[in-house]
């Protein structure tokens, strides 16, 4: 039954040979999912669209544990939010989730739920970062090992959070230094790449002895993760963070790219993330793409709208500086459209030397991407892929996957203690996405109503 359904969806959704056909994000692909999955998705998405739950998530979790006890509270979380957005805790649970995604034409993008907030208390020193480093290596191995059919070499992706491997405070200090005139030579990607390769001490004049030692250890961790990922044929998608960290993060990514995105490496193994909700993103993206082209380096980009809007505006108000974000959602959408057009043009010109992930839950952005891919002659399963969060936007993900596009679901995994705080932070950063999921909720309600009335296609559980 599922195979027949897939064939019907592919015949309806796939681009025809005679011309581009727009995909239908009308929830038709929900037929591929069980009633229990759809019911949980509807309930959880409605809960997550309730602002008090998102704002006070950690306090509510603590209250639930005190009132119900750890076991019952944990069981409720596993049956709801954890089950909706997390692959599981063990390798076997993650593999089971990924195999289910593969039957639906979707691919995994594993994410270790570990990070450091710029204004948080100091962690446990180098031991904390070394523990995260080991977790990243395990994520590389898990990304490689969980797939029943890995597909073409280099199609395995995972997320990397730099502030899990290096201090956010150090990145903040480096960003302040980078923005000063004359700092470019001392903190060039070439110098950092050479230090990564050689392992020799790197001394930066703006840092004290302890900071220089931490920088050297951080470069070593990043280099070893990239080295291991390349050996396992896993591409690293580095997450963007706050504007007061991103220049330092981009410097580190550029250093990794010089080492691992060379013309003989087989396409980009290290990608950077660009946030369209920032005013200067299009220009920075244009400069980076042209610089990679001139240097003969492969170029990989994950294009997102952005998740730190409230924090960015709060910081700008506090320091009396210009707000770096677009004025409203419409301006952000225009920025995303321009960046998308820029990158798709580069992909069409550079082929496998330029890769793009269209990481968006916005239907119009996805339609623009699929149409321009057809117009530019970019293959469906080539250098352009799509990305959405696990447990969200399935009406778009499933339609894309069944039409033959490469679609990845961002998948956190780990214990309740590790993942729930991570999920709550993601929810706080993505309030607009969660509150904008009303259309998905409507489509889920329609599908469930059909099944209750006996008119829907029933899928075995």
Image (cartoon, grey):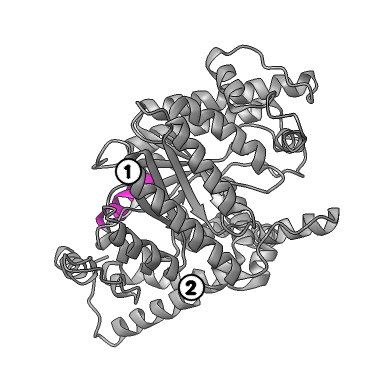
In depth, the one of 97 and 281 nearer the eye is 281
**Residue 386, percent across and down?**
39, 55
**Residue 159, percent across and down?**
48, 42
**Residue denoted by label 1:** 351
Of all residues, the one furthest to the bottom in this rendering is 453
Question: What span is colored magenta in the figure?
Answer: 93-103
Q: Main secondary structure of the magenta part?
A: helix
Residue at 37%, 25% in the rendered image: 231
Indicate the quadrant where residue 305 lies: bottom right
Residue at 50%, 56% in the rendered image: 339
Q: Is residue 98 above or below residue 183?
A: below
Q: Is residue 149 above or below residue 321?
A: above
- Left or right position of 363 against 375: right
In depth, the one of 435 and 59 nearer the eye is 435
Q: Residues within 10 Å of mark 1 (few under 14, many from 20)?
A: some
Residue at 34%, 77% in the rendered image: 26
Mark number, residue 43: 2
Q: Residues within 10 Å of mark 2 (few under 14, many from 20)?
A: some
Indicate the quadrant where residue 354 lies: top left
Q: Mark 2 vs mark 1: give the one in front.
A: 1
Q: From the image, which quarter does the C terminus lie in?
A: bottom left
- Left or right position of 103 against 189: left
């Amino acid at each position: 039954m599922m195979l027949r359904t897939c064939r019907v969806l592919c015949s309806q959704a796939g681009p025809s040979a005679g011309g581009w056909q727009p995909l239908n994000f009308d929830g038709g692909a929900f037929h591929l999912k069980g009633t229990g999955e759809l019911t949980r998705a509807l309930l959880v998405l409605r809960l997550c669209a309730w602002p008090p739950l998102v704002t006070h998530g950690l306090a509510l979790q603590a209250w639930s544990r005190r009132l119900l006890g750890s076991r019952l509270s944990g069981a409720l979380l596993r049956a709801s939010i954890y089950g909706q957005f997390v692959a599981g805790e063990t390798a076997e649970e993650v593999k089971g989730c990924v195999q289910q995604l593969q039957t639906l034409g979707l691919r995994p993008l594993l994410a270790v739920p570990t990070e450091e907030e710029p204004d948080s208390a100091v962690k446990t020193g180098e031991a904390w970062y070394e523990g995260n480093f080991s977790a990243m290596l395990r994520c590389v191995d898990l990304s490689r090992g969980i797939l029943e059919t890995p597909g073409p070499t280099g199609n395995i992706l995972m997320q990397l959070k730099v502030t899990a491997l290096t201090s956010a405070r150090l990145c903040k200090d480096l960003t302040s230094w980078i923005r000063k005139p004359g700092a470019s030579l001392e903190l060039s990607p070439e110098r950092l790449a050479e230090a990564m390769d050689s392992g020799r001490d790197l001394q930066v004049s703006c840092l004290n002895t302890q900071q220089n030692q931490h920088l050297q250890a951080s470069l070593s961790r990043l280099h070893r993760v990239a080295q291991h990922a390349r050996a396992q044929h896993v591409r690293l998608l580095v997450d963007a963070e706050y504007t007061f960290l991103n220049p330092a993060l981009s410097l580190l990514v550029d250093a990794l790219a010089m080492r691992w995105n060379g013309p003989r490496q087989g396409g980009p193994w290290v990608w950077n993330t660009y946030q369209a909700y920032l005013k200067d993103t299009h220009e920075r993206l244009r400069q980076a793409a042209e610089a990679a082209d001139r240097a003969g380096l492969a170029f990989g980009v994950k294009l997102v709208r952005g998740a730190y809007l409230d924090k960015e505006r709060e910081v700008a108000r506090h320091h009396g500086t210009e707000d770096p974000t677009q004025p409203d959602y419409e301006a952000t959408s225009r920025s995303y459209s321009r960046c998308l057009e820029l990158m798709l043009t580069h992909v069409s010109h550079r082929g496998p030397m330029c890769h793009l992930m269209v990481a968006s839950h916005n239907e119009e952005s996805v339609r623009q991407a699929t149409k321009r891919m057809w117009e530019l002659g970019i293959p469906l399963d080539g250098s352009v892929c799509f990305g959405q969060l696990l447990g969200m936007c399935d009406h778009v993900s499933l339609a894309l996957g069944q039409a033959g596009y490469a679609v990845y679901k961002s998948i956190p995994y780990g214990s309740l203690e590790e993942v729930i705080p991570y999920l709550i932070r993601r929810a706080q950063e993505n309030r607009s996405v969660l509150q904008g999921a009303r259309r998905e909720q409507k489509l889920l309600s329609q599908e469930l109503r059909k099944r209750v009335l006996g008119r829907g296609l029933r899928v075995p559980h």
